[in-house]
Amino acid sequence: MKKGQIYEGIISSVEFPGKGKVFLEEEGKTVIVKNGLPGQKVRFSINKVRSGKAEGRVLDVIEPSPFETEPPCPHFGQCGGCSYQNLPYGEQIKMKEAQIKDMMDGAVDGEHMWDGIKPSPMESAYRNKMEFSFGDEYKDGPLALGMHKRGSFHDIVNVTGCQIVDEDYRKILSCTLKWAQETGLSYYHRMRHTGYFRHLLVRKAVKTGEILIDLVTTSQDISTVQRLSERKIDSETEVQQVCSVKNGQKVQGILQKWTKSLLNLQLDGEISGILHTINNSVADVVKDEGTDILYGQPYFYEELLGLRFKITPFSFFQTNSLGAEVLYETVREYIGDTKDKVIFDLYSGTGTIAQILAPVAKKVVGVEIVEEAVEAARENARLNGLSNCRFWAGDVLKVIDDLGETPDLIVLDPPRDGVSPKALERIISFGVERMVYISCKPTSLARDLEMLQGRGYKVERMACVDLFPGTVHVESIVLLSKLKSNKLKHINVELEMDELDLTAAESKATYEEIKDYVLKQSGLKVSNLYIAQVKEKCGIIERKNYNVSKKEDSKVPTCPPEKEVAIREALEHYRMI
């Protein structure tokens, strides 16, 4: 089997996240292919063969799956946002449940109660937040605004018929694209670091109907964009010089025209705010480097389980409001009796879980690294009349010893990559009777369960809640209890010094993961040496083999400024700095 060879086969099963298995009898090998369904006969090309494992790319579907239906979205297949829209929803959740149960059965020690999967209350138009990207549908094509094309970091698909949002989103998207095309301004080119338009952020509350719209651009003014759109900027310093030009009257004029166009739309909801955010970062992420209010206010309100929450543009809030109610009801059920208990809500976001538990607890302490989210959590607690909630801003590992409290119960809702080993060790050391772990990435959950079970916790119950119909993603929730022991056990453990020398930051992302992130976000290729140099500048312990030359007279190259910025973005993404 070689790269580039073409085969045909039937997808026997699909594992999380959307990895189809095709067994080739003539080769005696199983090939992993993405974006397929069980039962499909597909033609595919081999794009990777390594260590006896093979991966392929589906070229076309020869025969459909017996379960397959016509997808409701006109962009399905081109857009990279959804993978299962051609599968009836009942079959989607059956497959997701089987995937997670199979993974957890291999990760959990002993017997536990499996509570199955809870479906989303809404199968379509369920999202309360979308980040659309500006770009072109093909190289040098007309300006586009939508989602990344499946399998592409550069091409954008116009998604004016997107089905995971309601009609208000589609109207706002179409209005903004038409206006942006009329301006004649270009989108921000990731490789050239020039251009104006970057992202459109739209958030809408399901319960209140309030809408918040945020246009994200560079700070280059019109003349700068037009002058530099044809040439490449090579250094981060030059990027900052270009972007330091203050927006002039022309820019303010076109933004006012956009604002007026939005306010003239006939929407079911009501626009509470229209914002303009500056982002001059080289990374392809929505980043706030200053926000102006063009209309209304920079926040909106949503309601969950009888509580009211103020949400700002960039604060974390579950993207499926009605599904979040199902998830948080499950948390309340799993956590059990909270009377006279102190609860730690770690990775608390805007404090939704903390405030849902607070009315029946003695005290809830939330910890969140994003300061904007912490401020929102404090204000939401005041808004809901909850005086027994306290929120701290900072990294869980660094802040947890300063809380001045000893928890009786702990709720964990970490980012996709889970909890760092050192933070998890500190959390385990509290020895709480019960702990609830919520995860949006089951592979991270499986890894963390290994440590939790190895340190004396037992999995009691597990369930899934589908907050993302049509996609490969699903939330998992686990109840763990502390095992009781009547006698001390002494175990002799031998540790290599290299294991002890691993810092918490180093354990968060490998060099390959950092390289992949930098390449995807900025299009730049970086070496281990450059990553090590930047990590050293950031105070992360490094091993000598990356920093010290083996030859006395050799010259060590220095990481260029634009690559240093991109590497720092990656380190921030993985919360290593």
Image (cartoon, helix red, strand yellow):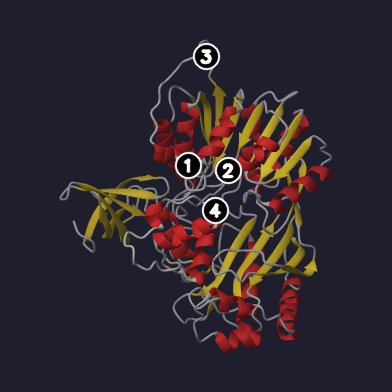
- Evaluate if marks 2 and 3 touch, with contact meaning CB atoms under 8 Å apart: no
375, 534: nearer the viewer? 534
- Residue type marked 2: Pro
Residue at 28 percent across and 58 percent down: it is: 48
Spatial CA distance of label 2 from label 3 is 29 Å
Q: Is residue 555 above or below residue 357?
A: below
Q: Which mark is residue 539?
A: 4
Q: Earlier in the sequence, mark 1 or mark 3?
A: 1
Helix, strand or loop at disc 4? loop
Q: Which amino acid type is shown beneath numbered disc 3?
A: Ser
**Residue 187 in view, yes or no:** no
Query: What amino acid is labelled 4 in the image?
Result: Gly
222 horizontally vs 483: left or right: right
Disc 1 to disc 3, C-alpha distance: 28 Å
The answer to whether the residues at label 1 and label 2 have Cβ atoms under 8 Å apart is: yes
- Asked which secondary structure carries label 2, the reply is loop
Tell which circle, 2 or 4, labels the residue nearer the N-terminal end: 2
Name the residue beneath numbered marker 1.
444
Left or right: 245 as drawn, with respect to 416? right
Are the residues tagged 4 and 3 within 8 Å (C-beta)? no
* Disc 4 versus disc 3: nearer the observer: 4
Of label 1 and label 2, which has the lower sequence position? 2
User: What residue did someone put label 3 on?
Assistant: 485
Q: CA distance from mark 4 to mark 3?
A: 41 Å
Q: First in sequence, mark 2 or 3: give its number.
A: 2
Counting from the top left corner in percent of width and height, residue 529 is at 41, 61
